[in-house]
Amino acid sequence: MPASPDRIRQVVDDYVRLVGTGTADEIVALYAADATVEDPVGSDVRTGHAAIREFYAGLEGLKQDTRLITARVAGGEVAFVFEIVTHAGEKTYTLAPLDAMTFDDDGLITTMRAYWGDTDMVVS
Amino acid sequence: MPASPDRIRQVVDDYVRLVGTGTADEIVALYAADATVEDPVGSDVRTGHAAIREFYAGLEGLKQDTRLITARVAGGEVAFVFEIVTHAGEKTYTLAPLDAMTFDDDGLITTMRAYWGDTDMVVS
């Protein structure tokens, strides 16, 4: 049985929260073992927990605030917009990627693709 | 050479405008001949101009206002949120789908997938 809309919304909430304040291990635990991550869309696809952990480990040291802006669940998949505000020194970097995810029957993420480009980053 | 970000943003603008005020033929002209449309995600995939025209022809009679809310271009693809307000009798139906599109080298849409569910429709 595919992941329920409620389960999918919970994973999205957890994902957005953990990107802001969680560890790479906590984020990886949301993914299926053979999941793929393409962030941003058009970049090399990372496959499996080790490659995905490496990706999120790069964010661990950053001071980041995140919030979900809007999500649409359809056919056992989800697409959502969320905001990441990164504080580095005296500057603030704000990015609102649009992510699409698919899930396995256990509600683990099987694919994540993040749509954003350099021009979407706002520095203040 | 893949479609440029500028071309992709133009197609998105045209698409959103034409869903509101265009004809099915005008919308179909944005699609490649063998394009696919899955709207909403999880429903049957429509393939080719005839099937896609039939889909948009169903919207032609409706009084609709549309506007683009936000778009992210990445790797020759795009994902965007737009709003469709449909006026029917004394009621107004507001829906903000999240659409993902891919393109061929001529900037024609090759795939469109729309994320939205019944619970995302607001009736007023």
Image (cartoon, coloured by chain):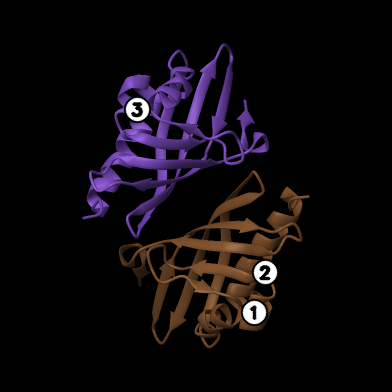
Chain colours: A brown, B purple
Q: Which mark is residue B24?
A: none
Of pointers 2 and 1, the one earlier in the residue sequence: 1
Residue where numbered disc 2 is placed: A32
Q: Chain of mark 2?
A: A
Say if B10 sits above or below A51 in the image.
Answer: above
Residue where numbered disc 1 is placed: A22
Closer-to-camera residue (A14/A101): A101
Quote the CA–CA distance across marks 3 and 1.
44 Å
Amino acid type indicated by mark 2: Ala
Residue for point 43% across, 27% down: B52
Residue for point 45% across, 20% down: B54
Q: Is residue A33 left or right of residue A52?
A: right
- Quadrant of the frame with the C terminus of chain A: bottom left
Figure quadrant of residue B31: top left
Label 2 vs label 1, nearer the camera: 2
Instruction: Measuring from the top left, give residue A21's x and y in whole percent.
Output: 62, 78
